[in-house]
Amino acid sequence: MSYAIIRNDKLTRVDAQGSYIHNDRRSKGHSNKDIDPTRTHLNFWCKKNELTYIKEFDKMKKEYDLKGTIRSNSNIMCEMMITSDNAFFDKIGLEETKRYFKESYKFVCNYKNLGEKYIVSAAVHLDETTPHMHLVYIPVIHTKDKEGKDIDKICCRDFWKGRDSYRQLQNAFHKYITSKGFDLERGLPVEETGAKHEKIEDLKKLTNFENTKKVLDNIKLELPETPDINDIKLIKLNREKVENEIIKPKDDKIMELYQENLKLHNELTKQVNLVNKAEKYQKERDSILADNKELNNKVKDLEHEYKKKINTLDLRFENRKRQLEEEFANKEFDIDYKYKSKIRSLEKENNHLHKIIDKFYVTIEKFIDWICHKFGIGESKELVRNFEEETHSFIDPQKQLEHEEREKEWDLEI
């Protein structure tokens, strides 16, 4: 019986780039020997990405205003691998195979209310040993923020919250896909089987693979020929006795051995198929690890270039900062010098005016005393007082200015 197989993996930015290269067949020379380039044209997409997975993620995060704290090592996407076995796909044919993946795509779009818009890519590979689909999506949960507003948030941990989250996925997928007319058994998740990844060499030793293949190739399933009693002339008289005591027990033994041989053949076939599949997955894993190693090297090179540019920019910034500080200090010094020079000039001019005014006061007083003495006019103070009363003017310029200001105020009030 064939199984409905669905698995989920979490992807960081580095993982997502490796998946993109493999899923979109971006590598020039495939390290995965199970890929048949002459069949790659048969591959198709249930949803085709326009950009790389990373650029699609950045674009969708901005376009749909997705919340969530994203660090350099965060799981930003997930990838589901959906398939069955070759016997199932050979049985249903190409058109039903395509329908199987299209229905699987619809299932994931609606699973946990995800939404088709958060599917990044869904590539179906028909150019490998077994047909399968790589479906990459952003694990978005629909929740509320601290203020109670509805938001869409990227959170792989909460999307797959709970120990039985993958068991629920298996149950839901099996129920859905069988309801669409596909006769499949429920696949078993790793958490139920307890299976773990084994190296191909270890698995071959464990199953005695090489010897098993030889035994399997040498097994003959045809029944051996048995002697025809009619050809044995010497025992014609005792035919019934010979048949019951010799021939029939041998025939029964041969049939028993034949049935055991069939069971052994089936068991050995299962072992060989298991190793073949494991070897295929090992090749895929080696290919992914090689791609990841190459990507890690590229990331390290980019980080090195980035640090060099940052250091260069920092140095330029510091030099420019010092240059501006020096220019500012020079300008500040020039302005301060000019300001102080102007103050000194004004103070000098002010002192000169004070001397002129003081000299003018002394001269006026001498002039008034001289007039009074010359023409026999009483005291100078009386003369000044009479002048001020008759002319409404003051000898003291300060008093004269105050008087004029009061007259202006009186005119305005009138």
Image: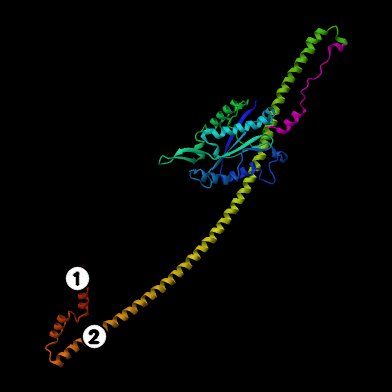
Looking at numbered disc 2 in the image, what kind of residue is underneath it? Phe
- Residue 104 in the image, given as x and y percentages of width and height: 60, 32
Up/down of 178 relative to 12, above or below: above
Q: Disc 1 to disc 2, how far (Cα)?
A: 31 Å
Looking at numbered disc 1 in the image, what kind of residue is underneath it? Trp
Identify the disc placed on residue 360.
2
Q: Is residue 339 magenta?
A: no
Q: Nearer the viewer, residue 294 or 402?
A: 402
Q: Nearer the viewer, residue 379 or 208?
A: 379
Identify the residue at horizontal 70%, vertical 25% (top origin).
266
Quadrant for the N terminus in the image: top right
Q: In the drawing, does residue 35 fall left or right of residue 320?
A: right
Identify the residue at horizontal 14%, vertical 84% (top origin).
381
Residue 369, located in which quarter of the rendered image? bottom left
The local crowd at label 2, few if under 14, some if 14 to 19, many if 20 or more residues have their Cα within 10 Å, is: few
- Residue 249 in the image, given as x and y percentages of width and height: 76, 13
Identify the residue at horizontal 69%, vertical 37% (top origin).
42
Q: In the drawing, does residue 290 fall left or right of residue 254?
A: left
The local crowd at label 1, few if under 14, some if 14 to 19, many if 20 or more residues have their Cα within 10 Å, is: few
Residue 95 seen from this side: yes
Residue 379, located in which quarter of the rendered image? bottom left
Q: Which residue is denoted by mark 1 in the rendering?
A: 410
Count of numbered labels shown in the rendering = 2
First in sequence, mark 1 or 2: give its number.
2
Residue projecting furthest to the front? 414
Find the magenta span and give its range.
Answer: 207-232
Indicate the secondary structure of the residue bearing disc 2. Answer: helix
- Residue 33 in the image, given as x and y percentages of width and height: 70, 40
- Residue 357 in the image, given as x and y percentages of width and height: 25, 83
Residue 205 seen from this side: no
Q: Nearer the viewer, residue 287 or 91?
A: 91
